[in-house]
Structures are given as structure tokens and as C-alpha cells.
Image: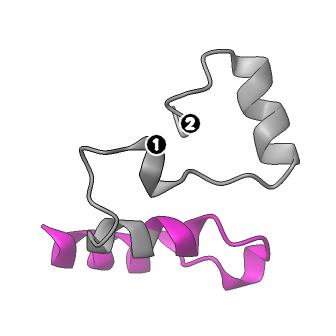
């Protein structure tokens, strides 16, 4: 679930439609400085053209591990 604090599927859909994005403050177990947040920010870009392809995501995730 992309929004840990949103428990309803409908509310998740509305959050996405309102261009809300997951925030590090809502995920204290994943430090804000973790490189995974950079990957997520890219994947959640408002412009679909700017979002990385799956090969790029895979490569970036391997580097995060």
C-alpha cells in the first residue's frame, strides 16, 4: 500500500488523483536519507515521461541493497 496511513482503497485512489505522494515522515522505519526514497520520488513523478522504466528501477533497487 503506497500510503501507510490511508486504510481505504477509495482514499488511496483519491490521494493519487490529488497527486499526493508517500512521505518519509509517514515511514519512520525507512530513514528519509535512504536512497530508496530517490527511486520512489522518480517513480511518482507527475510527468509519466519522466518516470524511470522497469529496467532502470531494477538497476537502482539493486544499488540500494
**27 to the left or right of 46:** left
Q: Which mark is residue 3?
A: 2
Real-space Cα distance between discs 2 and 1?
8 Å
Residue at the outermost left position? 65
Residues at discs 2 and 1 in contact (Cβ within 8 Å): yes
Left or right for 24, reference 16: left
Per the rendered image, the range of residues in magenta is: 40-65
- Name above or below for residue 58 compared with residue 21: below
Above-or-below relation of 44 to 8: below
Q: Residues within 10 Å of mark 2 (few under 14, many from 20)?
A: some
Question: As rendered, which of 12 and 56 lies closer to the eye?
Answer: 12
Q: Find disc 1 in the rendering and name its residue.
A: 26
Residue drawn at point x = 26 percent, y = 59 percent:
31
Foreground of the two, 46 or 24: 24
Give the image location of residue 65, x and y in percent.
Answer: 12, 67
Q: Position of residue 41 (x, y in %)?
A: 54, 70
Which badge, 2 or 1, is on the more N-terminal residue? 2
Label 1's element?
Answer: helix
Is disc 1 surrounded by few (<14), some (14 to 19) or many (20+) residues within 10 Å? few
Q: Quadrant of residue 43?
A: bottom right
Q: Main secondary structure of the magenta part?
A: helix
Res 62 → quadrant? bottom left
Is residue 21 part of the magenta span, yes or no? Answer: no
Amino acid at each position: 500500500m503506497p500510503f501507510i496511513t490511508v486504510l481505504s482503497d477509495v482514499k488511496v485512489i483519491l490521494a493519487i488523483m490529488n497527486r499526493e505522494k508517500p512521505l518519509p515522515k509517514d515511514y519512520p522505519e525507512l530513514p528519509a536519507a535512504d536512497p530508496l526514497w530517490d527511486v520512489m520520488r522518480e517513480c511518482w513523478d507527475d510527468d509519466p515521461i519522466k518516470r524511470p522504466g522497469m529496467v532502470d528501477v531494477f538497476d537502482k533497487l539493486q544499488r540500494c541493497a
